[in-house]
Amino acid sequence: MGVAERKERHREDLKNEILQAAKSLFTEKGFEATSIRAIAEKIEYSPATIYLYYKDKNEIVHALHRDGFRLLVSHFEVLNTVSHPFERLKAMGRAYIQFAVQNPDVYKLLFIMEEPLKHVANCFEEWDEGDRAFDILRKTIIECQAEGYFKKMDNTLLAFTIWSTMHGLCTLKSSGHLGHVGVARANQWNLDELTAMAYETFVAMLERMKT
Amino acid sequence: MGVAERKERHREDLKNEILQAAKSLFTEKGFEATSIRAIAEKIEYSPATIYLYYKDKNEIVHALHRDGFRLLVSHFEVLNTVSHPFERLKAMGRAYIQFAVQNPDVYKLLFIMEEPLKHVANCFEEWDEGDRAFDILRKTIIECQAEGYFKKMDNTLLAFTIWSTMHGLCTLKSSGHLGHVGVARANQWNLDELTAMAYETFVAMLERMKT
DNA sequence: ATAAAAAATAAACACTGTTTAGTTTATTTC
DNA sequence: GAAATAAACTAAACAGTGTTTATTTTTTAT
């Protein structure tokens, strides 16, 4: 059935077109400032057409959530080339910050907004993407332990702790809260430097966790 | 002028009534889900009346932001009774988590939302509340350094790092992201336990930073 | 060419924050 | 006490939001 196939392909095309339009508008204007009508206008369809391809706005957000996670995981996969586990761990931290800074809206989608997560909870799928990203961190920690780091510490708990620190650094930086603390403005540091230095401080702490 | 005074007092009363109605609705329904109309209905005035007392919705949010910070600082002031600085530091961490868990909407107001911060930036005031909270942490760190902890580490950078970890723990927990990681559900841990244990893991790291 | 099916839309609904013009209430002046 | 002034309040509207329904246009199959 060549005809049905072509139609199906066209359907998928339009579905993807909606997604790309939404993505570009989200990163351009932010989430709250992007309306269904604006997405419709960008792809030159009527607003109601969007609803033929996506149940509601949350479904669009959820689709971008999945894409975003794939992007993050692919960012981390490059680090497999770093053979020494602790060096890899450090590189992962830097990569995480870099990802958050370069893709603030994607980051918001992945780790701050609650709606896309609710959608995951409703589906029976086990949030593979998130688990995979977390497992990358956990495995690296376990490898570090084989080298004498983090002895007698639970790898899962340490993974949560490290993730929390990274997440805290990224969110406090990009939300502007870090920048509004007086002592931060008083020194000559800019925000990126400050974040990098705080990360190095944390790395220094991790480094002491050997033997 | 007794009359003018009484009127002024009434004005302040209504202004405060609006604030309390907003606060209760915010904590009850969340920020996004509370409208000016809902606030107006709660105090039994017309929506337009709100605008006679507050410039816009952001000004209400900002007023609650200030209140929230005072609440947080008062939470911390109790800890002055803890004489040993490192014990005090540990207690501060627990108090911080407790505050975030018990007042999730206030926490969101203080450390996640960007709008109230913008308002602070527009005013010339130097965000005293935030600076004071941060200074409490910094001073405790400096006292710890006098006891042999965190030698040769910059107290401001360490303060940022610790704050980031606490903020990360609190936000990942209450946003639900922590709970959606497979390994977290696999173990018997509940979210509060998990957060507490992750905090203890972090404390264990800090504890090693002596001499 | 005509009937059936699919795709797209115009228009409405129930909301939102906010503004404007008008009404009601309270105070002051005569 | 009655009239003029000032303050407080509100009804109604505006422009926007996500979403739904009924209708029209376009495509496909007979």
Image (cartoon, coloured by chain):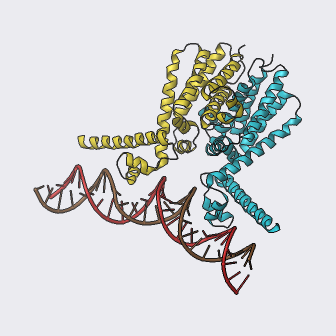
Chain colours: A cyan, B yellow, C red, D brown
Q: Position of residue B75 (x, y in %)?
A: 50, 25
**Residue under the point 65% across and 12% down:** B147
Q: Is residue A190 visible?
A: no
Q: Is residue A170 above or below residue A28?
A: above
Residue at 74% in and 48% down = A67
Give the camera-side residue of A186 and A54. A54
The part of the image, by quadrant, that contains residue B83 is top right
Is residue B28 something one can see in this rendering? yes
List x then y, in percent, for residue A155.
75, 25
Seen from the viewer's position, the closer of residues A39 and B84 is: A39
Q: Pick the quarter of the image with the N terminus of chain A.
A: bottom right
Q: Position of residue B63 (x, y in %)?
A: 46, 40
Quadrant location, the C terminus of chain A: top right
Q: Is residue A97 left or right of residue C25?
A: right
Residue plotted at (54% across, 36% down): B110
Depth check, front residue: B183 or C6? C6
Give the image location of residue A51, x and y in percent. 63, 60
Q: Is residue C27 above or below residue C4?
A: above
